[in-house]
Image: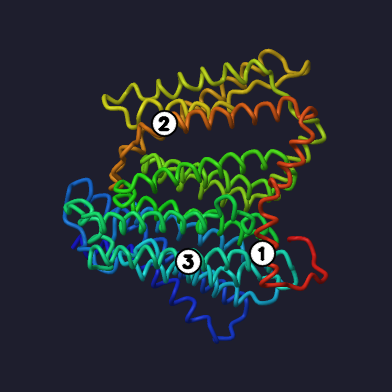
Amino acid sequence: MLTMLSVATIMPFGWMLMNAMLINGAHMSDHRVWQSYKRFAWAGVWCALLGVIVLCYQTYHHLPMMTPGVLSISPLQAVLTLLVQGLGLIIGVFSSRYLEGEARQEQFVIALSLVLAAVHMLLLANHWWLMIVAWGLIGSFLRTLLCFYADRPFAILASHKKIVADRLADVLLIVAAVTSWWVVGSWQLTDLYDALTHRAFDAIDSILITTAAVALVLAVGLRTALFPVHGWLIQVMEAPTPVSALLHAGVVNLSGFVLIKFAPLLEHVPLARNALVVMGLITCATGALIMLTRVSIKVRLAWSTVAQMGFMIVECGLGLYTFAALHLIGHSIYKAYAFLAASNVVHTTRVQQMAGKWRYESWSVITSIVISFGLVSASQLVNTVPPWPAWWNAVLALAWAPLLWIPAGAQMHAMTKFNKLLIGSMLTFGLSGLCVCLHGLPMGIQDAPHQGLAPLVIVAITLLYGVSSVCLLFPTHLNRLHRWVYAGLYVDAFYTRMVLRFWPISWGKSSHAK
């Protein structure tokens, strides 16, 4: 009975596909179109919630689950299915008001439903070709949403750049699938994992497995908009705001899930893990620094996503798959809220600009690291076995240290500074404690931390922290660096020129993003 109920995790895919088929060609009014979407989306949410409850119960009590076939179901897949369906519902409700009075709302709802259906297919896929097709369909259906305002050339340019990156990723995924099949003799992913665990490979098979892993990593880099093919993710700001929320919260970070899913393959090929760490660190550093130079709220959020995706890729390369999963979930929720509440952020930012830019006490930039490290370490005292290696505490301390920075200025009273430090300490301790608790959930993820890569990551994150601090504390002394960083080091310009050379677009009149 429980095994049958766990199939409820598959139902959101069916509900969203049914909604798209029902609306297509039905000539409904915009109101009825959105009502249909909300009903089917709610049905998907309840099915996904039932699937999470059943699968977590089965995992906790070590009960048998559905036998993997073309599809597979795990607690992590069930949680992400619920997350994606819930975000799809919220974004749909927001879109029904945001697009009121706009033309082509029916096409928008159909594309939105099909994107969600394709995402669910990718989450549940246990077959190379099903995964490749699902990932390709996500990009194809997403293009309709990205180009909803067809008169905006930058939206079309971003779509073209994404298509180029997606097709290159498809080729790499096919290479990975074929080389894997040549070694294992099966297209199913669980058969690949079993072979990696129980078989000894000869020299040729080892080369093929390495090829599959490296091709997968490169494909993930293209799909995740890692540096230097990150430009399209910034330029999609020309699309409607709910599309940005969907892209940043439920699509671009799917690569993190794919890497977690292929953890056995990554653990077998150190070259692939090392490549992930290097790619992730470069992307994280560039995205974080460029974000500091931008003024537009949506563009800052986009660069933040680039940096966060880079950091999540680093977590996967280090074998900290549970942290990567938590990062994926937290980032999805935060970015959906940030984009959908962008108008409130604009108002808050304008108020802050009128009050003048905040300055920070330079000494707090150093002391915050020590305090943050102590709080992160203290949050693990309740566990007899630490949920993550001790060296990762240093990385978390650097990541959360800005929460403890103390505002400077004569107008800041001592009590105000103390309250800021107290709130920052509570947030840091709370975040770390939450991570400790969530590590105990039965999500079916097996971590494999890699000590050898720890020094590289700690040094890189320390340098990033130092450069970011200098940029914030002494902005007037870094004008030349500011120009280069603001331009994204001019890397995306080469990619843009290449795409325009082979796929030119018309630069007619266009309005600013809504």
Mark 3–mark 1 distance (CA, rounded to whole Å): 31 Å
Location of residue 417 (image quadrant): top right
Tag on residue 498? Answer: 1
- Name the image quarter holding the N terminus: bottom left
Q: Position of residue 25 (x, y in %)?
A: 55, 87
In percent of width and height, residue 141 lies at: 54, 72
- Amino acid type for the residue under numbered disc 3: Leu
Task: Please name the residue shown 35% across and 36% down the image.
Answer: 450
Residue at point 36%, 38% (across, down):
438
Residue 343 versus residue 502: which sits nearer the camera?
502
Q: Which residue is mark 3?
A: 116
Asked if labels 1 and 2 touch by Cβ distance under 8 angstroms, the answer is no
Q: Residue at x 62, y 76 (%)?
A: 30
Distance, label 2 to label 1, CA atoms, is: 37 Å
Question: Quick check: 110 above or below 322?
Answer: below
Q: Earlier in the sequence, mark 2 or mark 1?
A: 2
Q: Which mark is residue 454?
A: 2
In front: 425, or 224?
A: 224
- Disc nearest the viewer among 2 and 1: 1
**Which percent across, then down, holds residue 490?**
70, 49
**Neighbourhood count class around disc 2 (C-alpha, 10 Å): few under 14, some 14–19, many 20 upward:** some
Task: Give neighbour class at mark 1: few <14, some 14-19, many 20+ (Cα, 10 Å).
Answer: few
